[in-house]
Image: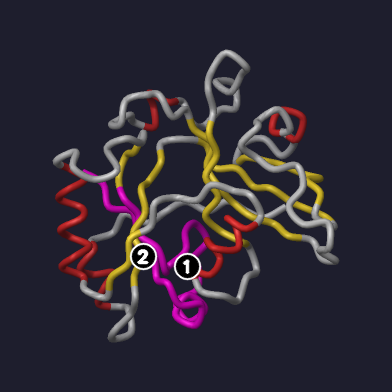
Amino acid sequence: MRRLLGLDKNCFSNWCEKLPGGTTMVVQPKIAGCAIGLRYKYGQLVDAYSRENPEIIEIIRTINTIPLSIDDSLKIEVELEGVLYTPTVSSRLSKDQFNSNSIKPFDINRPLAFLAFQIFSSKKDELSDLTQLQEWGFEVPITLRTEDPKQVKIWHSQWINNELFSNLPTNGIVAKCNSFSTKDFLGVSSTFPNWALALTR
């Protein structure tokens, strides 16, 4: 079972200074929801977990936006991460309001959606992984791409003004490095990946 890390909220300018020149960044909505890990063996869903609960497979099997099978021809285990959320809530929902630290809100009386955004142990770039996730039947986050830090700041301002990702329950945006080699170079800390950053209010 992989550890589901959080996101750093350090100053964006300071974060950018640590990136190699010309780094391509991708920007996605920071969904207010519950981080979920999924494990597939020979293409079949065999395990699901959150940060607080290591055994939620029976609940996850009832979510129709999560494929029970991704590729019957796979000969290896695949583990990935995504976010489970309620798509009809306010677009400016806080973590406390959503109660994302608990699996209890997830029941049959609430419409649920799942967005997959990471394949653990992948050695491909971010955009390639998103394409692979789509091919496996997952929905993935809206993803913007740029090499200009100023553009990320513009997107952040647009999010603050409710002009970007306004149809989703968000509490920020996420900037990530696209290149696997850059992510591998930056590595991860004990609590978050150094190649990703959350930009909030």
In the displayed structure, 51 sits above or below 190; it is above
Reading the image, the residue beneath label 2 is 26
Query: Can you give x and y, in whole percent of width and height, for residue 87 in the image?
Result: 43, 29
Q: Residue at x 53, y 34 (%)?
A: 113
Q: Residue at x 39, y 65 (%)?
A: 176
Report how many numbered discs are placed on residues in the image.
Answer: 2
**Magenta range:** 173-201
Tell me the amino acid under the disc marked 2.
Answer: Val
In the displayed structure, 116 sits above or below 77; it is above
Q: Hey, which quadrant is residue 153 in on the image? A: bottom left
Relative placement, left or right, of 41 versus 127 is right
Q: Which residue is drawn at 65% across and 32% down?
A: 64
Mark in the foreground, 1 or 2: 1
Q: Residue at x 82, y 66 (%)?
A: 76
Q: Which of 194 and 60 is in front in this view?
A: 60
Reading the image, the residue beneath label 1 is 127
